[in-house]
Image (tube, grey):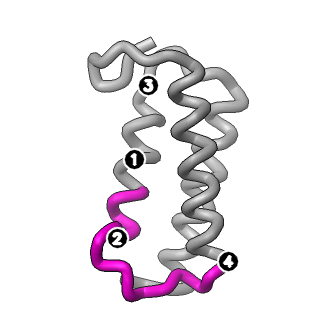
Amino acid sequence: MTSNGIPTSRCMIDHDLTHLLKIVSAKRAMGAVRGNPILPRSYWKRRVEALAQTDGLLEYQMTAINKLRSILADLDERFPE
């Protein structure tokens, strides 16, 4: 498996997905607090899309990526940056 040409493991991808789901879900639960200039929503989107480009993703991993995309789209709609 590779992501942007970098070898990765399913375990690393699962860890990243778990981390992203926790952070992005928390942002949604908190009402997308706008005062976080250190890590804007665009950062999380790039992380999700980088994972989505990984070769050989399993169905459950794509499901998690699509869930993240949905949460981020909801945040964009409710709280434009």
Of marks 2 and 4, which one's residue comes earlier in the chain? 4
Instruction: Kindly identify which residue carries mark 2.
Output: 40
Mark 2 or 3, which is nearer the eye? 2
Q: CA distance from mark 1 to mark 2?
A: 12 Å
Question: Could you tell me which quadrant the N terminus lies in?
Answer: top left
- The amino acid marked with disc number 3 is Thr
Q: CA distance from mark 4 to mark 3?
A: 28 Å
Q: Residues within 10 Å of mark 3 (few under 14, many from 20)?
A: some
Q: What range of the chain is rendered magenta?
A: 30-44
Helix, strand or loop at disc 4?
helix
Of marks 2 and 3, which one's residue comes earlier in the chain? 2
Helix, strand or loop at disc 2?
loop
Which residue: 43% across, 18% down?
8
Q: Residues within 10 Å of mark 4 (few under 14, many from 20)?
A: few
Number of callouts? 4
In the figure, is residue 4 to the left or right of 53? left
